[in-house]
Image (cartoon, coloured by chain):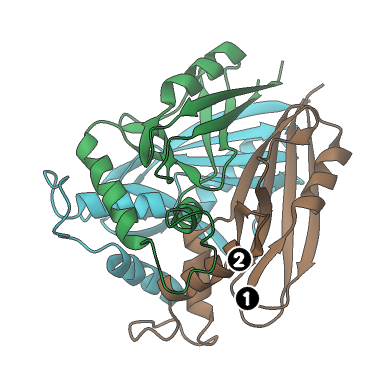
Chain colours: A brown, B cyan, C green
Amino acid sequence: MPEAHGDIFTVRTRGQGTYEITGEVARIVRASGLTTGTATVFIQHTSASLVIYENADPSARTDLHAFFERLVPEDQEYFVHTAEGPDDMPSHLRMVLTRTSEVIPVLHGRMALGTWQGIFLFEHRRAPHTRTIVVSVVGA
Amino acid sequence: MPEAHGDIFTVRTRGQGTYEITGEVARIVRASGLTTGTATVFIQHTSASLVIYENADPSARTDLHAFFERLVPEDQEYFVHTAEGPDDMPSHLRMVLTRTSEVIPVLHGRMALGTWQGIFLFEHRRAPHTRTIVVSVVGA
Amino acid sequence: MPEAHGDIFTVRTRGQGTYEITGEVARIVRASGLTTGTATVFIQHTSASLVIYENADPSARTDLHAFFERLVPEDQEYFVHTAEGPDDMPSHLRMVLTRTSEVIPVLHGRMALGTWQGIFLFEHRRAPHTRTIVVSVVGA
């Protein structure tokens, strides 16, 4: 019987960087009892985002962080949205260049992730934040 | 009972910039009568895109526009796809760096957007265009 | 009656570039028999990605490839993830800037793509690879 399940969890970040959330999402998919469909992971923020990324070698994440610091530098002279600090506007731009939602097919009751894929929260602010993630599992 | 609803609407843009469409999408979700599932917003164009972005302070959108003008400048000497004008190829590239679809979980009959999140059409062409948005609501 | 269907196919790439997969996805949507809902296309890799892009004039794809070579160059002095060759780390970054999944509404039994939109696999590695694509069709 086709169904839809929604769930919410929070992640406490320690500032800029990537935080793997694959396990939390997998638990929600399993608890839904659905065997075929999709898992939609959504972050309710505009200064943090989501990426599906290489989860084996941490050096790939080090380079990811360094790349975004260079691609979207702080303190650009043309920025007018500066009231919330130098890391605020770059956070919005780094979010726009990555994703607010990731949708993963569910097959045989599990997310159909590839061998090296993990789901990561990408925190763009320097200060620790509590981030809210919504997961919707739809299917049969 | 799980169901699926599809709807279409158009937005008349006035040239480059972001145009909020959260209200139109929310109306379609409400009209679907579904309480749990996902709302998929899709733009049927390759020179305009979608972003979920900060909807409170317009200065954040000013900087977004300025950032993309710098990240993907017009008139690059290596461009070969130039027949439709100098703003055409940058439009395709700015579209690729943002999104063609955004998927938002539906909980308790409403989109589970965060406090500061709005859904925006990002027009990349200089001339006004009529853009078609498709919304699919799937769930129970 | 709402349903969910999952399918998998592989694409053999010939190295860096874009490969259209619209036809394969359309066949899976048609075979599902669903009339309204969504088709989720997902790539199980972190060095290849998906884009919905202009499918009429091949010169737009030539410029897309050239743009990403410039935006994410190889051999950056700050890269530490270099064990798998000079095209590996740029592959991960070009993947993050495009998409792991694309979700397309299904209306009247067909994907609601715009006139000029095609679904493309974006191969970021230089060597030929076999890439696995998962498609989940959910709806009624």
Instruction: Report the Cα–Cα distance between label 1 and label 2.
Output: 16 Å
Q: Is C41 located above or below residue A64 in the figure? A: above
Side of A99 relative to C114 (left or right): right
Percent across and percent down for residue B21 are 47, 52
Secondary structure under the numbered disc 1 in the rendered image = loop
Determine whether label 1 and label 2 are within 8 Å by CB: no
Percent across and percent down for residue A35 are 80, 27
Q: Mark 1 lies on which chain?
A: A
Secondary structure under the numbered disc 2 in the rendered image = helix
Q: Residue at x 14, y 44 (%)?
A: B84
Side of A118 relative to B71 (left or right): right
Query: Which residue corresponds to mark 2?
Result: A59
Percent across and percent down for residue B14 are 27, 55
Q: Residue at x 53, y 51 (%)?
A: B23
Q: Please, what is the three-letter code of the amino acid marked with disc 1?
A: Gln
Query: Which residue corresponds to mark 1?
Result: A16
Q: Which residue is drawn at 67% across and 55% down?
A: A55
